[in-house]
Amino acid sequence: MPRPLRPLLAGLLPLLAACTAAPVGLDQVLESELDELRWHWGDLHAHSAWSFDGCENPELDCIHDAAGPASAFFERAEAVGLDFAALTDHAEPDLYRYAADELHPTGATLDIWQGQQLSVVQAEGGPVLPLLGYEWTANHNAGNTDGPGTHRTVLLGADRACPAYRVAGRSLPPDGHLPEVGERAFLQEDRPILPSPYSLWQALDEAILAPGCEPLRWLSFAHHPAYLNPQQTDWSDPENAPHREQLVEIHSEHGSSECFDPEAEGCDFALNHEQGYAPRGSVQAALDRGFQLGFVGGTDSHDSHPGSVEDGPSRVAQWSDEAPYELIQQFAPGGLTGVFAPEPLDRERLFEALSARRTLASSGPRLELHAWAVGRNGDRYLPGELIPRWNMPVGLVLVLGELDPRGEHRWEDFEEVVIERIASGGRIVSFGSGEAFGDSWEPQPDESWTYLRVRLLRGEASTGYPSLLGEERIWLSPWFTDAPSGCSAAPAGPPILWPLLVLLLAQRAKRTRATASQASASSAGPIQAQRPG
């Protein structure tokens, strides 16, 4: 928990106690979490030259660094201040063959999975928690019909894993995959091809039965789900249902996959129409189908630079059709994942927080914040949690704190902060400006989720990347509720006094500004949630 928020939360405790019926132990819970939890920042999806579309050195035909693919991956994660980073190269090829080039006097053939594990093992004990993973792909198109079509990121809870934990979703050509750029080849050995998420999860469950395999934790999530190229995840296809998953990637270098209706208000952010936006693959479409998924962001960078949201999109090992002598550049700078977890961070604590959906996704800024919901009986819920309908309505609170203590953004970069509450169907149901937000959620019978979205607006003199429309965004994982049961047995106290709560937030939540004029501009503080229209 960021230290600057401690005085604010301490001041809120008496008010919360007065506005609820039976806040048993609420002050102890909050005080305990102040000491134990804080936001950790990382990249859960990034590639190196171990991937056939990886491009570590664009100026040298995408060849890898002299010490080997991904040799500098975690050093670069440290350079941008990440707490954790995942090396998630493609799972389908097994061998990497390269010829002699400017950085290597001789060529060689390398085992990809051994190379990935070596990179993770060598980074153990450093300032960045290294994660071992891969991208599993099941393409479905005219040339390849061996899967329903989806991409998943798989993360493993150890620094090494036997080959049974590395699952292929599609077949490569018999002579391997030959990238368009560089003298390289990616070869696939004889192993099972498992082209559906169900078969992927089953193989991960059964990996322990393979000779020499140790039990380890795993999780998976869909990435860039709303883009036809490289492959959407159509949530209406039963084979794509995320029944074993708790997360979804909402933003990456491919663009934003947030909105079901890209024409709706607030849904024009980082939309990559050239790649074919597919509303049925959007995150909101998944939520409306009842899938309870928290939000993560990643770069999906292909240049062995995890967390590189300040240098623009990375390049991939493919030539552009329009400009044959230029490598294809991805669309947006990518994103990061914030995880609310105890210190010190380790794999167990990270996986626990990810599985509990205590996450947010960011287009880049690392914003310290605290968010919670208070039920009518005083129970408190963090983003990502399920709130029983009998405990409705709930009060939602978001308080913003320090911006980018180790990153590149500053409050003076932005002219305005807008906080929006999004509900079923992707509707903006309330909004406010300032560094704190309070609202009440009493879901309709057909509503099952709501989330908060923070928009950091640069104004007309924007220096941001063009695809981000002069703003940055942060998406908090949704709160969920169950289906109506007709039961309202919980003790109900007096209504939560939102005007008084927001007034307290306005008095206490003050940002540090670089100039006196900026400090004066923020003195009006937050406002209570407004309803559109």
Image: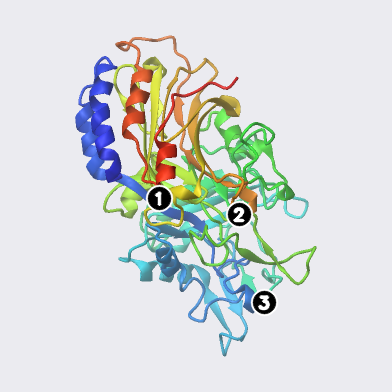
Residue beneath disc 1: 514
Is 296 situated above or below 528?
A: below
Q: Calculate the distance from the C-alpha at mark 3 to the C-alpha at mark 2.
A: 29 Å
Q: Position of residue 56 (x, y in %)?
A: 57, 71
Quick one: quadrant of the C terminus? Answer: top right
What's the amino acid at mark 1?
A: Ala
Q: Nearer the viewer, residue 101 or 516?
A: 516
* Label 1 SS: loop
Q: Is residue 26 above or below residue 253?
A: above
Q: Nearer the viewer, residue 341 or 371?
A: 371
Using the image, determine if residue 310 lies above or below residue 462.
Answer: below
Q: Earlier in the sequence, mark 3 or mark 2?
A: 3
Place of residue 111 in the rendered image (x, y in percent of width and height, measured from the top left): 51, 73
Residue 33 left/right relative to 213 = left
Dot label at residue 182: 3
Q: Earlier in the sequence, mark 1 or mark 3?
A: 3
Q: Nearer the viewer, residue 180 or 25?
A: 25
Q: Position of residue 176 (x, y in %)?
A: 67, 70
Q: Are marks 1 and 2 in contact (CB under 8 Å)?
A: no
Does any portion of residue 245 appear in the rendered image?
no
Query: Is label 1 or label 2 in front?
Result: 1
**Count of residue discs:** 3
Residue 465: numbered disc:
2
The quarter in which the N terminus is drawn is top left
What amino acid is labelled 2 in the image? Tyr
Type of the residue with mark 3: Gly
Q: Secondary structure at mark 2?
A: loop
